[in-house]
Image (tube, rainbow, N blue to C red):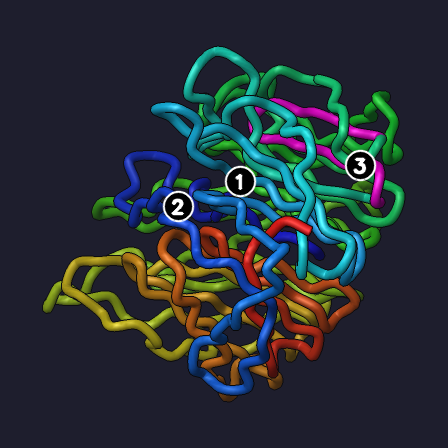
Amino acid sequence: MSRFTRAVLVAAACSALAACGSSSSPGPAAPSAASSPSQSGRPATASPGPGSQQPYRGFGVTSLSFVTPRQGFALGSAACGSTRCAVLLGTSDGGRTWRRLTAPTQSLGQPYSTCPDRRPCVGDLAFATATTGYAYSPALMITTDGGRHWRLLDRTGVASLTIAGDTVTRVDSGYFGCSGRPYKVQSAPVGSTTWRDLAAPAIVMICPPVLYRQSSQIVLAGYGNPAGGVRATARIDRSSDGGRAWAAGPDQCGGHDGYASAVAIAAPSTVVLLCQHQMAKPDGTYGPAWIRVSADNGATFGPGRPVPDAVASQKGEVTSYRLAAGSSGRLLVLEGLNQDWRLLRTANGGRSWTTALHPDAFGDAFVTGFTGGQTAWVGQANSLWTTHDGGVTWHASHFVSG
């Protein structure tokens, strides 16, 4: 799959009175730069680029969608007057330079698929080709000319959307935010406005579930309340035939306080759960997270394997995690506390880990991958890190004009 955007899954897990760490707004823009490689756990440092390149000042990326390792799109925001406005950028050279396109809406979507005002807004991107793409959460917009023009399909209620091949699949409730209302899982050919319902079982939670799709493999992850003194509830519904037949079950993180705060899937039938503790230990800290990997589309899972504590733990604070999978063995976990983030990599399904990257920008970070099984991206504020070898080496760049 090609996206992991704005911690949508974490927001769903925090749906009802959850005490999750808040995401910070994008910080100041980083200087203009070309790319330079990083081959260790130290930060990838960008070197000055050509004088003709200028950064998009104040730009903060929130969602990335690459259709090939070179062709991609970035949705974010930049200062406009006393507020921030949505900005859409496109690249055709793998992120070395970017051109400004037409933002699908004036404002970006907020946590829990809400808008800052009553006008339509979006918070995520999913492109199928260099010309056809969608902006969603909570509205749904479509472009067929590479982001130059957008058309409104739904004003609200599309909380999750993914593209696999020539099929787009969405979760649609028709309401803002976590309303607890019924939802539909629907699919359509890319570019079509005619949707058909899939026979997905209902997950009775406050927020609509988060959707993942890879070829004919579909996973829906729904959450209860991970805050307070009761066990977090999570449910994973899965289909291996494009949504005709479904199997349901708990998230398999196990334990009296474990729940899956992130999910990733990879071809042909890999499902990965990032498990966290819901309740603090007596000293006020939380134990390390762990992963469980399934190679049969979630029917069975391997043993829990701990994720190293890569950021300094503070009493009472919960570490945030982002997850991406290139295969059952090749995984990336982005681990953060406040503004301190580390990217961890494993090539053997979590048996051993290395620190692959230390993003050093200011603001929330996310990981998007994999395209072609080897290419992935980390975005944070005005900075972008790219790998083409499964996360072994990374190249740093910034969102600069061509």
Q: Nearer the viewer, residue 29 or 2?
A: 29
- Residue that numbered label 1 is attached to: 76
- For image coordinates 66% across by 38% down, the residue present is 100
Q: Are marks 2 and 1 in contact (CB under 8 Å)?
A: yes
- Residue that numbered label 3 is attached to: 146
The earlier-in-sequence mark between 2 and 1 is 2
The relative height of residue 103 versus residue 275 in the rendered view (above or below) is above
Mark 3: give few (<14), some (14-19) or many (20+) Cα within 10 Å.
some
Compute the Cα span from label 3 to label 1.
16 Å
- For image coordinates 41% across by 57% down, the residue present is 259
Compute the Cα span from label 2 to label 1.
9 Å
The three-letter amino acid code for the residue at tag 3 is: Gly
- For image coordinates 43% across by 42% down, the residue present is 11
Looking at the image, residue 359 sits to the left or right of residue 377; the answer is: left
Compute the Cα span from label 2 to label 3.
25 Å
Residue 238 visible (yes or no)? no
The earlier-in-sequence mark between 3 and 1 is 1
- Residue that numbered label 2 is attached to: 26
Q: Residue furthest front?
A: 51
Q: Residue furthest top?
A: 118
Task: Find residue 106 and report its horizontal and vertical position in percent.
Answer: 54, 22
The earlier-in-sequence mark between 2 and 3 is 2
Task: Report the magenta residues as a range.
Answer: 129-144
**Quick one: quadrant of the N terminus?**
bottom right
Looking at the image, residue 281 sits to the left or right of residue 400; the answer is: left
The three-letter amino acid code for the residue at tag 2 is: Pro
Instruction: Please tell me whether mark 3 sits on a helix, a strand or a loop.
Output: loop
Q: Which label number is shown at residue 110? A: none
The relative height of residue 270 versus residue 233 in the rendered view (above or below) is below
